[in-house]
Amino acid sequence: MAKLTLDRILQSQGFGTRKWCRELIEDGEVSIAGAAVTDYRAAFDTADLHFTLFDEDWTYREHVYIALNKPANIECSRKPSHHPGVLTLLPEQFTWREVQPVGRLDHDTTGMLLMSDDGAFIHAQSSPKRHVPKLYVATTHDEVTAALIEQLLHGVKLHDEPEALAAVTCRQIDSHRLEIVLEQGKYHQVKRMLAAAGNHCTALRRTAIGSLTLDALNLEEGEWCYLDTAQLALLV
Ligand code: URA
């Protein structure tokens, strides 16, 4: 791993412009291995690099991979218009790092949202060719019936979609809730499929992507965590 100067390291981690990062260093706000480093030209190997900024410990990360338990009334779009954007739930340096959601959840959908600043990862995860199963729990306005489940499994035709879309699996949880697994990520797909099958979705929660479950992450609504290599490997 190449060495980087401390000002570049701080900037790459989203702590502000190079000029601002140099000022932080010269002001003695950055420590490595317990000692303040005030020369911004000092170079460090970034592999397994830990540093302290404003008394908070950080680990250098070339990219960040995050899972968020998204609450309702938060927008995933870049320019949110009616509700706060999803980046408001993360520390400010993630905005500087240009962290983005991997795909989108509707403003009223809750549950697992992946976020990253790794363009290749975002692209690969969002590719329609990947067929990553996503598990949702949908609450319905009308009762869940065997006929509804049958239609969702068989496939329903949505306006603007050339082919009927079918759930990979679908099972009833109780009178007004079902669990549905989809491999595509079409716009409002669960809600539109339920509407096409004659019901109406009143609440939607994404509980897993691939084999990575929200339960295993143990996040309260609005909380986030970094994903490690083992967790990323479950996203298939
Ligand atoms: N399907 C929907 O209808 N909305 C979402 O947010 C995700 C999947």
Image (spheres, rainbow, N blue to C red):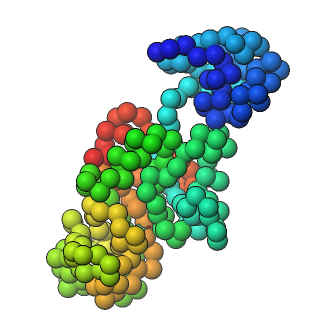
Q: Position of residue 146 (x, y in %)?
A: 20, 83
Which quarter of the rendered image does ligand 1 occupy?
bottom left
Q: Is residue 197 left or right of residue 45?
A: left
* Residue positioned 64% across, 16% down in the render: 5
Vertical arrangement, residue 137 with respect to residue 14, above or below: below
Q: Quadrant of residue 54?
A: top right
The location of residue 108, given as percent across then percent down, is 52, 71
Query: Is 202 situated above or below 46?
Result: below
Residue closest to the far right: 27
The x, y position of residue 210, in whole percent, is 30, 51
Q: Quadrant of residue 198?
A: bottom left
Is residue 126 visible in the rendered image? The answer is: yes
Left or right: residue 198 compared with residue 101: left
Seen at 62% across and 23% down, the residue is 9
State which quadrant residue 181 falls in. Answer: bottom left
Q: How many marks?
A: 0
Q: Position of residue 122 (x, y in %)?
A: 42, 47
* Residue sitting nearer the eye, 58 or 41: 41
Q: Residue at x 36, y 79 (%)?
A: 192
Residue under the point 25% across and 54% down: 129
Vertical relation: 41 (above or below) 224: above
For the question of whether residue 133 can be seen, the reply is no
